[in-house]
Amino acid sequence: MKRSERLVDMTKYLMERPHDLIPLPFFAKRYGAAKSSISEDLAILKHTLANNQDGILETVAGAAGGVRYIPFWGKKHAQKYLNELASRIEDPDRILAGGFVYLSDIIGNPQDLDKIGKLIATRYAYSDIDVVMTIETKGIALAQAVARYLNVSFIIARKRSKVTEGATVSVNYISSSLDRVSKMELPTRVLKENSNVLLIDDYMMAGGTLTGMQQLVREFNGNIAGVCVLCEADFDDVKLIEGHLSLVKIKRIDDKKKVIVAEPGSLIAHTDFDRF
């Protein structure tokens, strides 16, 4: 097999298995090539990914070592996309009642989901995430996109359990409107004790739903490894949660004047982009 063919197949194989450690002998056997040739191939891939700021190729020395692909977006790519996303969200036609913003077209767009998933996975690439968690329904696609790049499972808290999921654990939480108590449930089988959990949601007002998710994780003796949302209502002074990150901040919504003011959120400032 020619080197060009090896490089194409090797790139595809690694990108389909993010964060998996692949032994070098595996590639040597797969392509019928010497380990020295495989090492040269990997050096080319590593340089290209770093030069394009599109991922990190890590090599681990030793008998149990190998190589792993870490999905990782460069700062210039992240800033460009979030500036564009904030600009799109400023469309006044997105204004909904109660301080909410229409995001379904973004969440339903495969290209946006891919970028959002990779960007959040970049921030938490080295946080030892075991599972990504969200609540039905809008956050499901986001959680799946992030989990795909972290190569971990994602789980869904539901407002009403289904008989097909077996026994559940439930908690009560204050809804985003802060005027009623709601309930969310999680099947007992989906979350192991001491798991590091990344919480994902589409839109945050006061943070009541995310607080409920935190409570639910603690019922399983899990650890909150991070909280990240697509959009945050930054004009809401009442916050029930701290330490969260957002991709976009909604600074102001004026329903009468049909104005939305949005800007990139806190995620970029809290991401170490110097790993390239």
Image (cartoon, rainbow, N blue to C red):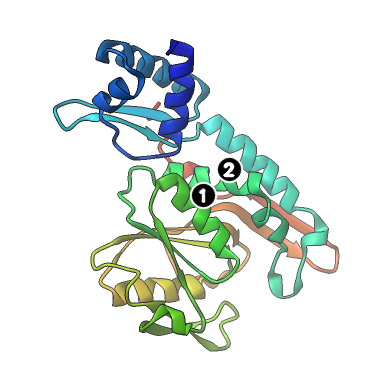
Give how far across and how far down residue 48 sits, in percent.
Answer: 47, 18
Q: CA distance from mark 1 to mark 2?
A: 17 Å
- The x and y percentages for residue 197 are 35, 61
Query: Can the viewer see residue 141?
Result: yes
Residue 156, compared with residue 78, is above or below; it is below
Q: Secondary structure beneath disc 1?
A: loop
Residue 60 x, y percent position in the rendering: 23, 28
Q: Residue at x 60, y 80 (%)?
A: 177
Residue type at numbered disc 2: Lys
Q: Which residue is mark 1?
A: 266
Q: Against 198, is 123 above or below?
A: above
Amino acid on which the number 1 mark rests in the picture: Ser
Picture disc at residue 115 = 2
Task: Check disc 1: other Cα within 10 Å, few if <14, some if 14-19, many if 20+.
Answer: some
Is residue 103 visible in the rendered image? The answer is no
Q: Residue furthest left?
A: 63
> Is residue 251 depicted above or below 23 in this figure?
below
> Which quadrant, please, contains the N terminus?
top left
| Secondary structure at numbered mark 2 | helix
Q: Is residue 60 left or right of residue 38?
A: left
Q: Which numbered disc covers residue 86?
A: none
